[in-house]
Amino acid sequence: MRCSWCGDTPLYIKYHDEEWGVPVYDDMIHFEFLVLESAQAGLSWLTVLKKRENYRKAYEGFDPKVVAGFDQDKVEELMQNEGIIRNRKKIEASINNARVFMDVQKEFGSFSNYIWSFVGGRQIVSSYEDIRELPAKTHQSEALAKDMKKRGFKFLGPVILYSHMQATGLVNDHIVSCFRHKEVSVSE
């Protein structure tokens, strides 16, 4: 059995089975998810997943150093790219966030060190029996959002950041009957 949120959509199933809840320590992957999750605001995650490969190309493999250097001409180019979500504020926020992301890397040695500090360096393993029990945000995601906002990040509130924590395995929110619940918390 798997978590019901992925339904029978192959892309969702692959994401659920291979990525969601798996601990991430790679800064490039964290940055990728931050860009994608901020783009998702107000949209479905499936919409963003369908555009993920287009984002990888448009955002130069999600290299924060490259994205931080995007200028107004690049913003205009991205606004014409039908393969991504063409929202000027979200695009400009992603460029801003790349710059702030690098500041965090300098301060903490890596973004991973920074973000994992909000869960005490260890994955939080939930024990929800039903997907409806999952919270939209937690005190950890609220603290993270507050700190990130203070540092200058944009389009990353406590709900989006809780999604980030779930996606990158800071939290294992697979329901207990899901085959990934024990696999993620034990083996990865």
Image (cartoon, grey):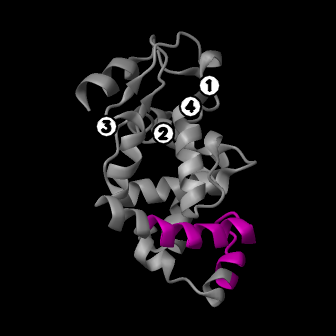
Highlighted range, magenta: 76-101
Amino acid type of disc 2? Met
Q: Which of marks 2 and 1 is nearer the N terminus?
A: 1
Residue at x 73%, y 48% (from the top left corner):
43
Query: Which disc number belongs to residue 139?
Result: 4
From the image, state whether disc 1 or disc 4 is nearer to you: 4
Query: Nearer the N terminus, badge 3 or badge 4?
Result: 3
For image coordinates 49% across by 17% down, the residue present is 175
Residue visible at 61% across and 32% down in the picture: 137
Q: Are circles 1 and 4 on residues that touch, CB within 8 Å?
A: no
- Where is 72 relative to 83, above or below? below
Inter-mark Cα distance, 3 to 4:
16 Å
Mark 3 nearby-residue class (10 Å; few <14, some 14–19, many ≥20)? few
Of the residues under marks 4 and 2, which one precedes in the sequence? Answer: 4
Residue 165 - label: 2
**Which residue shows up at 61% across the image and 85% down it?**
74
Please tell me how crowded label 4 is: few (under 14), some (14-19), or many (20+) other residues with Cα within 10 Å.
few
Q: In this view, does 52 lie to the left or right of 113?
A: right
Residue 163 location, quadrant: top right
The mark found on residue 135 in the picture is 1
Q: Where is residue 94 in the image (x, y as percent from the top left)?
A: 59, 67
Task: Give the amino acid type for the residue marked by disc 4 in the picture.
Answer: His
**Which of the two marks, 1 or 3, is nearer to us in this view?**
3
- Name the residue nearer the viewer: 3 or 176: 176
